[in-house]
Image (cartoon, rainbow, N blue to C red):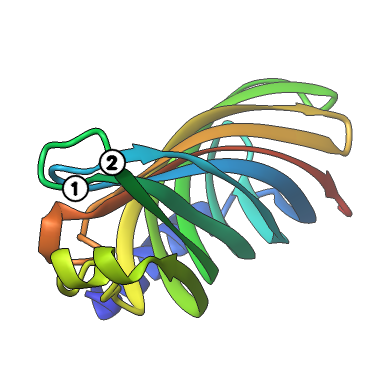
Amino acid sequence: MKKYLLSFAIILAAAFSAKAQFSLGAKAGVNFSKINADNVSESSVTGYQVGAFARFGHNLYLQPELYLGSSGGKFDFNNNGTTTTTNGKVTFTSLNLPLLIGKGFGGDNLNFRIMAGPVYSYVLDKNQSFSDNVSGAYNDFGDYKKSTLGFQAGAGVDIGHITADFRYEGGLTKINQNFGQRQNLWALSVGFKFF
């Protein structure tokens, strides 16, 4: 799968290279993530993202990014149908590599954009807290994968060198085969284009 993504990126980069404008920048932002799971109540956690992006093209563009991010989820477990609940939380620190294709509407000083594309995430660190009775009743609930594939879609605006994006990220692969766990998040980021 990685070979196909790399080949696709090379072909698109070659297609844009004849008339491409090139931008390089840094970005940072906040996200609200949740892990959907079967038969468990979920809630979101607040995380961050910080990294860099490149943009090839203007009206039609290719934008690879590389950033460090924090995400995860909270869970409420209902014990045997009673009102007694226990909870748990997991947070990931991951390296994320989106490859977005977008369309711009505007000029150099004011440009509105839409974008979508795949994202590869690799977990660098995991912090989870589940009570003992959760671990016993929900065997392997926290057995999470190190890498996943997802998609991002959203919109953004460029005002001069300042850029802002609002995106949704959904999981294409499960982060845990048990309980159908998939991660999704909403992210808001602000960046600066150096050139």
**49 lies left or right of 92:** right
Give the x, y percent position of residue 110: 79, 20
Residue 5 seen in the figure: no
In the image, what residue occupies the spot 34% across and 40% down?
A: 42
**27 lies left or right of 49:** right
Task: Say what secondary structure mark 1 lies in.
Answer: loop
Crowd rating for badge 1 (residues with CA inside 10 Å; few <14, some 14–19, many 20+)? few
In the image, what residue occupies the spot 25% across and 71% down?
A: 135
In the image, what residue occupies the spot 11% across and 37% down?
A: 81
In this rendering, the answer to whether 114 lies above or below 91 is: above
In the picture, the quarter occupied by the N terminus is: bottom left
Corner quadrant of residue 157:
top right
Task: Say what secondary structure mark 2 lies in.
Answer: loop
Amino acid on which disc 2 is placed: Thr
Disc 2 from disc 1: Cα separation: 6 Å
Residue designated by label 1: 79
Amino acid on which disc 1 is placed: Asn
Corner quadrant of residue 139:
bottom left
Residue 84's disc is: 2
**144 lies left or right of 136:** right
Which numbered disc, 2 or 1, marks the residue that appears first in the sequence? 1
Callout 2 touching callout 1 (CB < 8 Å) = yes
Front one among 66 and 147: 147
Give the x, y percent position of residue 67: 63, 64
Front one among 138 and 7: 138
Crowd rating for badge 2 (residues with CA inside 10 Å; few <14, some 14–19, many 20+)? few
**131 lies left or right of 31:** left
Residue 7's disc is: none
Residue 37 seen in the figure: yes
